[in-house]
Image (cartoon, rainbow, N blue to C red):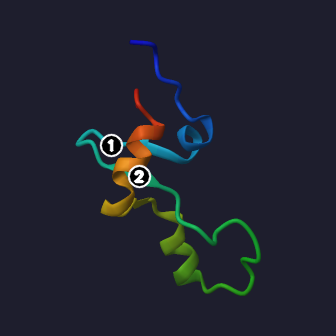
Amino acid sequence: MPKLKTNRGAAKRFSKTATGKIRRKKAYFSHILTTKSPKRKRRLRKRGFISKADVREIRRLLPYV
């Protein structure tokens, strides 16, 4: 079997935890932060998990992660 290529864009956006879950960065925290409340910005700083529906697709993009 040939080696599979890792999707580099996905590799920069997702990481795997020790238990095998896939983490992601939350959206809406890159610009126009002055209109967002401190509470909302605090929540956006934390990492989230991808939904169950997307797990299979992301695992295909990251075969060795």
In the image, taking residue 30 as reference, residue 41 lies left or right, namely left
Image quarter where the C terminus lies is top left
Q: Which residue is mark 2?
A: 23
Residue 64 locus on image (x, y percent) = 40, 26
Q: Which mark is residue 62?
A: none
In the image, taking residue 55 as reference, residue 40 lies left or right, namely right
Please name the amino acid that badge 2 sits on. Arg
Q: Residue at x 43, y 47 (%)?
A: 58
Tell me whether circle 2 and circle 1 mark residues in contact (CB < 8 Å).
Answer: yes
Residue 60 locus on image (x, y percent) = 42, 39
Q: Residue at x 63, y 72 (%)?
A: 28
> Residue furthest toward the top?
1
The secondary structure type at the circle numbered 1 is loop
In the image, taking residue 22 as reference, residue 44 lies left or right, namely right
Q: Residue at x 48, y 39 (%)?
A: 61
Please name the amino acid that badge 1 sits on. Thr
Mark 2 crowd level (few <14, some 14–19, many ≥20, 10 Å Cα): some
Quadrant hosting residue 12:
top right
Residue 10 locus on image (x, y percent) = 55, 43
Image quarter where the N terminus lies is top left
Quadrant hosting residue 47:
bottom left
Location of residue 44 with respect to 47 vertically, above or below: below
Q: Which mark is residue 17?
A: 1
> Residue furthest toward the left?
19
Mark 1 crowd level (few <14, some 14–19, many ≥20, 10 Å Cα): few
